[in-house]
Image (tube, coloured by chain):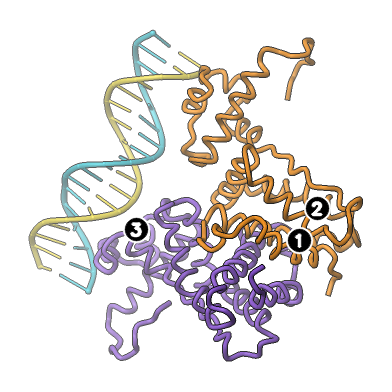
Chain colours: A orange, B purple, C yellow, D cyan
Amino acid sequence: MNVEPDQTPARRSDGTRAAILEAARARFAAEGFRKATIRAIAADATIDPSMVMRYFGNKDGLFAAAVDIDLDLPDLSAADPDTLGELLIRRFLAIWEEPPGNEVMLTLLRTAITDDALADRARAVFAEQVLPAVLRYGDPADAPRRSGLIASQLLGLALCRHVLRLPPVVAMTSEQLVIDIAPTLQRYLTSKHG
Amino acid sequence: MNVEPDQTPARRSDGTRAAILEAARARFAAEGFRKATIRAIAADATIDPSMVMRYFGNKDGLFAAAVDIDLDLPDLSAADPDTLGELLIRRFLAIWEEPPGNEVMLTLLRTAITDDALADRARAVFAEQVLPAVLRYGDPADAPRRSGLIASQLLGLALCRHVLRLPPVVAMTSEQLVIDIAPTLQRYLTSKHG
DNA sequence: GTCTATAATTCGATAGAC
DNA sequence: GTCTATCGAATTATAGAC
């Protein structure tokens, strides 16, 4: 990102950069990539629009930086093998609970579904974070299949709860979701290829 | 596709109407509601754009007719209770296998995410078809929760396989999906509120 | 390089001839 | 039933000022 090495520990630009990213995430989540304008984002961050271009090059660069999320998945090889499913669903629900996780996930899901070109980013998150986490448990050769099944359940939950807003799925409490979905994830994670 | 009773003798307009709907489904699936123009759809069907208006009133009417899908879910109360999960996943996979089911489902997913006004239609399909099917099995008071869980898994599968195209999920065979996901649906369908 | 004002195009929709 | 002609809104493209 930074072309030149940082000479000073805390540069003055860090605050501006963070403010831009915060405004960008909120706008992208609320209005989508197309409708969220650089001008509006800059206004939210109370800076000049040209500053956005200076920091992130163009709108694509800003978007990439805004949705660069770290899922922070737990180490499945170090946890109690009987509670892996619960561990996963709880972490997933936590991500969706507050900013910036909820905004980033919502934006990623929306844009990936709408824009074919941006679906690559969703695949990248999967390949770089979900798959490696699952690789640390069970047969590595079978990890792609198991991680794919886990993604299908978790993304489907997010889709129904936060995007489509199906009333029964919205109405369910976090604890009820843990009770219902943890066993599914547990089975997917520990299942053998049929 | 809630077909009209075959009582009416084949009118001359039926062919035109069917041609319009076929073209509309393809365009809506490929380009979304906004970008798919009435003019382009009419051109595909080799008819005049004004015919589309005449048959369907306006663009919203055309869209509603194009995505009026009949999931044709099996009667869960009449089937072998031990194979309900398999029954559901097989029917779902069949819908996505060929037109017009795959186009309609893809269109519904995409538009429901982009256009808030059209998201109601996705909820309507759920409320009118998935929920009633589940209502025919088990405790009615608990049917919303169970049908919501089933929707989350099935839509998540469609999302990962047909929209995001996560490689491991795309690579799985139908039979492998049945083996892995049928038990999940079976458990959701027969589970009790926790 | 940005911003803005304006021209050109495209689209949904309507009216009416045949 | 089918088509032509056209309107008004919205989007896009372009040009020129700062």
- Earlier in the chain: of badge 3 and badge 1, it is 3
Report how far apart the C-alphas of labels 1 and 2 lie in the structure: 10 Å
Q: Which residue is labeled 2 in the image? A: A131
Task: Say if residue B108 shows up in the picture.
Answer: yes
Where is residue A114 drawn, in percent x and y? 54, 50
Q: Residue at x 56, y 84 (%)?
A: B74
| Tag 3 near tag 1, CB within 8 Å | no
Q: Amino acid at mark 2?
A: Leu
Where is residue B115 drawn, in percent x and y? 44, 51
- Front-most of residues B114 and B13: B114
Q: How many marks?
A: 3
Where is residue A2 drawn, in percent x and y? 74, 21
Q: Residue at x 50, y 61 (%)?
A: A167
Location of the N terminus of chain B (image quadrant): bottom left
Report how far apart the C-alphas of labels 2 and 3 lie in the structure: 43 Å
| Tag 1 near tag 2, CB within 8 Å | yes
Q: Quadrant of residue A159?
A: bottom right
User: Which mark is on residue B168?
Assistant: 1
For label 2, count other residues whose C-alpha is less than 10 Å away and answer few (under 14), some (14-19) or many (20+): many
Q: Amino acid at mark 1?
A: Pro
Location of the C terminus of chain B (image quadrant): bottom right
Quick one: SS at disc 1? helix
Report how far apart the C-alphas of labels 3 and 1 lie in the structure: 37 Å
Instruction: Tell me: A118 left or right of A80.
Output: left
Q: Which residue is labeled 3 in the image? A: B38
For label 3, count other residues whose C-alpha is less than 10 Å away and answer few (under 14), some (14-19) or many (20+): many
